[in-house]
Image: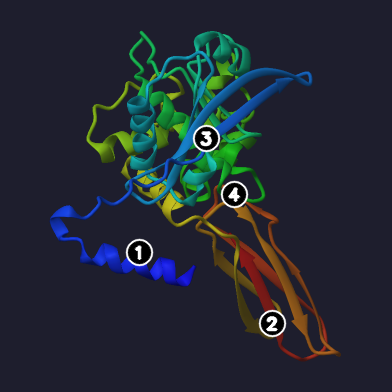
Amino acid sequence: MLRTLLSIVTAAALVPAAQARPEAAPPEPPEIIVVERIDGEVAYVARGRAYPTASGARVRVVVSDGYAVDEAERLRWAALLDSLVHGPELEEVTFQLAPRPELDDRCGAYALACYLTNTKTILATGFGDPGGIGAEALVMHEYGHHVARSRLNSPWGALSDGTKRWASYMGICAGVREGRFFPQISFGPLYRLNPAEGFAEAYRVLNERRLGVAETPWLLVDRRFYPDTTALALLEQDVLEPWRGNTRFTLTGRDSRVFRIATPLDGALRVSVASGPRTVYRVSAPATICGRRSALVRVRHVRGGGPFRLTVSRP
């Protein structure tokens, strides 16, 4: 075998460049088959591939059986998704083109598109809404939900409240507490006050501006979610440099003290105090930061004469 292979290589090397065989085309990505079951029965089947994109990612695009979408259109959608502000979560999403009846069945009647959280699937017809919302804008909105699902915003969910920096700047926590915003509402008048939808629309605006396309009218959600320049910058940071969790630092002192701690982001504030064996301190602080950009941490001296070490974990 080794000789034979060596002979072939040698013979190939003797062929003039003009007569050399062209390089083989890269192999076609394997087919992906997606099966949707309802009540245990196969309800819908879609087929497609994970298409390579300019960024080096592979984007899964599938089409429901019986829905006529050519290869060029599939590639166009893969390229569009790759053009959005994204991180590695791009390779986890499945983009599915489906006919209107399937969309009604799986997304709800009259839905223009939807994001299925359990399978990380964007479901769309590939067509816009006659009211003025284009097909691309709908998909940008739904990909915003996928971004949020892939980010942290502890102790809340980014999928319901938006990503950490955006939600803190927009006052989502305070808005929910005060009854101005309503997470989890998926239909009816309060849908317009759902921060998850506000985040997805802001993500859509961010991408339309970056891509230099006409901005879609702000129709789906309340104007209070419309992003200013700061909101867009923080949203982009949340996508490209996701918040990973609280940061920790320590402070030291002696006797009773009050510290004012800067709290740039909403979330859970955790504090603890330690001291020597014959010295006792107690510490108190708010458990949750919700709209305030600083918090008072009180260290109370109980007994003994030693110093304390205060550990702070803030969002």
- Secondary structure at badge 1 equals helix
The amino acid type found where label 3 is placed reads Glu
The amino acid type found where label 1 is placed reads Ile
- Which of the two discs, 4 and 1, sits closer to the camera? 1
Q: Residue at x 71, y 84 (%)?
A: 308
N-terminal of the pair, mark 4 or mark 1, is: 1
Q: Is residue 304 above or below residue 295?
A: below
Q: Nearer the viewer, residue 24 or 267?
A: 24
Q: Is residue 54 above or below residue 4?
A: above
N-terminal of the pair, mark 3 or mark 4, is: 3
Q: Nearer the viewer, residue 127 or 71?
A: 71
- Secondary structure at badge 2 equals strand
- In the picture of the structure, the residue carrying the numbered disc 2 is 309
> Percent from the top left, x then y, of residue 171?
51, 41
The amino acid type found where label 4 is placed reads Asn
N-terminal of the pair, mark 1 or mark 2, is: 1
- In the picture of the structure, the residue carrying the numbered disc 3 is 31
Indicate the colouring scheme.
Answer: rainbow
Q: Nearer the viewer, residue 242 or 118?
A: 118
Q: In this rendering, does residue 211 appear at all?
A: yes
N-terminal of the pair, mark 4 or mark 2, is: 4
Crowd band around label 4 with a 10 angstrom C-alpha radius: few (<14), some (14–19), many (20+): many
Crowd band around label 1 with a 10 angstrom C-alpha radius: few (<14), some (14–19), many (20+): few
Q: Which mark is residue 153?
A: 4
Q: Which mark is residue 8?
A: 1
In contact (CB < 8 Å): disc 1 and disc 3 = no
Q: CA distance from mark 3 to mark 4?
A: 35 Å
N-terminal of the pair, mark 1 or mark 3, is: 1
Crowd band around label 2 with a 10 angstrom C-alpha radius: few (<14), some (14–19), many (20+): some
